[in-house]
Image: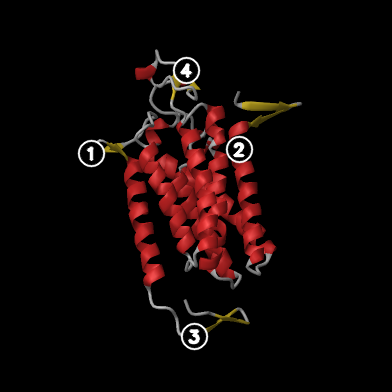
Amino acid sequence: MRDLALGPLDIRLYALSILLGIAAATWLTAVRWRARGGDIDLVLECALYSVLAGIIGGRLYHVITSWDQLGDEWWAPFAIWEGGLGIWGAIALGVAVGALYVRSRGESVTAFMDAAAPGILLAQGIGRMGNYFNQELFGTPTSLPWALEVDPDRRPFRYAEDETFHPVFLYEMSWNFVGVALLLFVERRWRIRAPGLFCLYVAWYSAGRLIWEQFRVDPSNEFLGQRLNFYVALALLSGAIAVFVWLQRRPAPPRGTRRVTRGRTKGVSAG
């Protein structure tokens, strides 16, 4: 079932999953930002711009890296309701636009990134439910009890005779939910210098992608026997860890250091 019929309306369950993820991420970020003394309106406004940018970035990434998988129709590059949003592009452009907006409001970009990190991962986890309804993002054939049954017209040609497959989207969804809990625990247990929590989010998700890419059977450009997204995940994992270590080990600013932001003076504590 890919659609939900509500009277004369047919709602794509893939799109609904994404919307639920966005709502959950906005809520969690608003709670966390308010706990830091921030304005919830900033979260709502930032979410609007970031989501729009994320959809554009995600689709651009998919079109650029998987152009040979698009249909022949002129509108195929825009058909996001058929699936095909590259998470790397969505996060990159969404975070970039969100950061610019937060900065334009005179708030700390790094602090906001840390506040939003668990929510972003939560949204990614919820959004993966859409892959179930679209019967996509599954792996190699398996007979495990939790295997996903895939319709014949959705199976790769080489697996046409196989009926059940690894539900990679479920593995990734579970990984993301565990990651949300870990990020919240780490933040509560240790003092993390911003945007260290965001770096941990990137590292956690990228580490998972290194595993999931070994299962996936959907078409993808490859290099040296590995899918393109494997190398993207490897680069991001390495970069995120390196930045996190640098952030936590760099010298603390002198005590009493002050910074002025949009007419407000904010103290920066040592450590």
**On the image, numbered disc 3 is attached to which residue?**
255
**On the image, numbered disc 4 is attached to which residue?**
153
**On the image, numbered disc 2 is attached to which residue?**
17
Instruction: Give the spatial CA distance, label 2 vs label 1.
Output: 34 Å
Between 131 and 54, which is closer to the camera in this rendering? 131
* Amino acid marked by disc 2: Ser
Mark 2 burial class by Cα count in 10 Å: few <14, some 14-19, many 20+: many
Count of numbered circles on the image: 4
* Amino acid marked by disc 3: Arg
* Amino acid marked by disc 4: Asp
Instruction: Give the spatial CA distance, label 1 vs label 4.
Output: 29 Å
* Amino acid marked by disc 1: Leu
**On the image, numbered disc 1 is attached to which residue?**
224
Relative to 271, 126 lies left or right:
right
Labelled pair 3, 4 in contact (Cβ < 8 Å)? no
Instruction: Give the spatial CA distance, label 1 vs label 3.
Output: 51 Å
Between 19 and 24, which is closer to the camera in this rendering? 24
Give whichever of discs 3 and 4 has the lower sequence position.
4
Front of the two marks 2 and 3:
3
